[in-house]
Image (tube, rainbow, N blue to C red):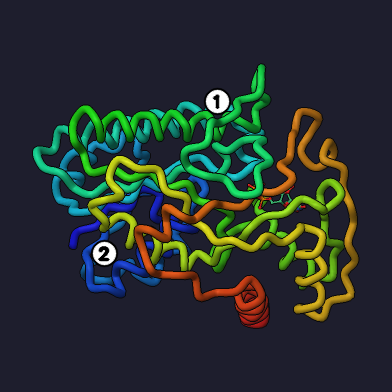
Amino acid sequence: MHVLITGGAGFIGSHLVDHHLRKGDRVHVVDNLSTGSLDNISQHLTHPEFRFTEDDIVTWPDLNEVVSWADRIYHMAAVVGVFRVLERPIDVMATNIAGCERLLRAVHRCGWKPEVLIASSSEVYGPRTDERLREDMDLIIQPEAPPRWNYAISKLADEAFALSYARVHDIPVTVVRLFNTVGPRQTGRYGMVVPRFVRQSLAGDVLTVFGDGKQSRAFTDVRDTVVMLDEVAAKANARGLIVNVGREGETSIESLAHRVIERTGSDSEVEYVPYEIAYGQEYVDIPHRCPDLTRLHSLTEFRPKWTLDATLDDLIARARRTHGAS
Ligand code: UDP
């Protein structure tokens, strides 16, 4: 199979590359390396079935040609990470919406129908506080939406584009709402909590828990996520649907901090940082976020293999090896 991965040098994208090369597929990545990194895919650069283009999805001149070559397209390219979103609220809207629309237009014009998976996010559930978040729930957009929600709004626009292309032009598109994903290559630079805690703990620094730490998230290991994405993309009955991708089982951020300290055997302490200091005045955090997986489970029998503790131990061991080698 020929696979195009936009944003394939990013955290999740690069694991999709690993997964498909392992299966014997041919993979083309386009990435502007804004948040992605060449390090994530450097091990594949000499692989005969792998091609990398450094370019922006919004302007890439070869988009039409490569879309025609592809059997499967994962659209992962986006401006991501809370810090990035707060810093560059206009880019988030402009890039995320224009990139997705350009891709869908290219698919429509390419003369045949590659399978398309559009990456959306659990962020679109906004401030909903339901026990389980379901794909068919009404969504809440807060009045005068603070910049944090620009990412969610851009992803909602992408979802609406994708479902409209599916309906109007019969393109085989599926939208996936990704919940908190963790694992190797995720960087803490843009705000993601797990790599930040692991780094802080190994350095003996304080672990910065934002707010009271009672907020919770359900984390999925990226190596499980990519298998689920592949399975969903292959299913004809997932076309035109939105599908949550994640796992159940929430962990509070406070307990995550203590778990990381315990598993690293560090002397680090936990510091509670008020939200307005962590992110600025306008920030609204979400008290808990857990997917309803009924739809996902009706599409695939695969169930995640990585527990959070196994992922943390793996991340800690990798960080120690890298540190030891430098
Ligand atoms: N968080 C934290 N300390 C950090 C980074 C993040 O306490 O150094 C918190 C953050 O406020 C949120 C949770 O961890 O409540 C998950 O944050 P992340 O950015 O990883 O994901 P998201 O907010 O998108 O769920």
Q: What residue appears at the point 19 percent right and 59 percent down from the top-left corner?
A: 2
Drawn side of residue 59 relative to residue 311, left or right: left
Judging by the rendered image, the residue that carries numbered circle 1 is 90
Q: What residue appears at the point 46 percent right and 62 percent down from the top-left corner?
A: 225
Which mark sits nearer the N-terminus, 2 or 1?
Answer: 2
Label 1 secondary element = helix
Q: Which label belongs to residue 50?
A: 2
Q: Is residue 102 above or below residue 9?
A: above
Drawn side of residue 234 relative to residue 80, left or right: left
The x, y position of residue 96, in whole percent, is 44, 34
**What distance separates the C-alpha of mark 2 from that of mark 1?**
33 Å
Q: Is residue 130 above or below residue 42?
A: above
Of the pair 265 and 149, the residue shown nearer to us: 149
Drawn side of residue 294 relative to residue 72, left or right: right
The x, y position of residue 175, in whole percent, is 38, 43
Q: Is residue 62 visible?
A: no
